[in-house]
Image: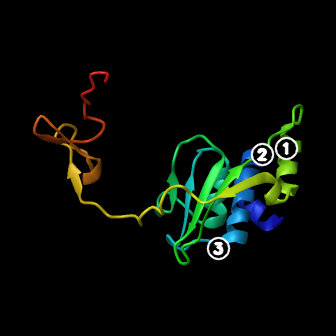
Amino acid sequence: MNKELWQKAVAFHGHECPGLAIGFKACEVAVKKLGVGRAEDEEIVCVTENDACGVDAVQAILGCSIGKGNLIYRGTGKQAFSFFNRRTGEKIRVYLKAQRDAGMGREEWKKKLLESDVEDLFSFSIPQFALPEKARLFKSLTCEICNEGAPEHKMRLQDGKTVCLDCFKPYDRGC
């Protein structure tokens, strides 16, 4: 285990925990199997299926972030991360198959995660979705109700007015 990288993830996250250890080990897979390091821009993409502690390790170690457009949240709730290397086209989905033993405390579980081989912790597959496109810039439009701006792809047309998602009232008849 790279203790320096672990401390970097802990400093970013704020504390040590099993969830951070899961993300840390998932990053280890990306480094080993895709040959990636820290992303300068969008050359590495992570699609995370959860919004838990492990995502902070991905941000701290691989440099993936929502702001850069190379960290994408796909909320299935699963402890799964898909990593894409834009330079080589390689990709891998990492799913936590290991389970916490009954009666195992948090500290013991964290230690087991950090000390285990990634092959014992995860199952590996090819993501069933395409590499997300690079981040795009969009024209900003002003909502005609609240006067706040938002990118055009997040606006809606309602009663002949351009409105933001907060002001939009969806029409749903329960079907």
Q: Which corner quadrant holds the N terminus?
A: bottom right
Q: Amino acid at mark 2?
A: Pro
Residues at marks 2 and 3 touching, judged by CB atoms closer than 8 Å: no
Mark 2 vs mark 3: give the one in front: 3
Pointer 2 or 3: first along the chain? 2
Three-letter residue code for mark 3: Val
Q: Which residue is mark 3?
A: 36
Structural crowding at the residue carrying mark 3, measured as other residues with C-alpha within 10 Å and reported as few (<14), some (14–19) or many (≥20)? some
Q: Residue at x 64, y 50 (%)?
A: 80
Q: How many marks?
A: 3
Residue identified by numbered label 1: 109
Q: Which residue is mark 2?
A: 18
Position of the C terminus, as image quadrant, is top left
State the SS at label 3: loop
Q: Is residue 160 visible?
A: yes
Task: Indicate the amino acid at tag 1.
Answer: Trp
Using a 10 Å C-alpha cutoff, classify the residue at mark 2 as few (fewer than 14 neighbours), some (14 to 19) or many (20 or more). Answer: many
Residue farthest toward the top in the current orientation of the protein: 174
Q: Is residue 109 above or below residue 2?
A: above
Tell me where residue 147 sits by quadrant. top left
Q: Secondary structure at mark 1?
A: helix
Q: Position of residue 103 (x, y in %)?
A: 89, 31
The image shows residue 62, relative to residue 76, as above or below, that is: below
Callout 1 touching callout 2 (CB < 8 Å): yes
Name the residue rendered at 67%, 75% in the picture.
35
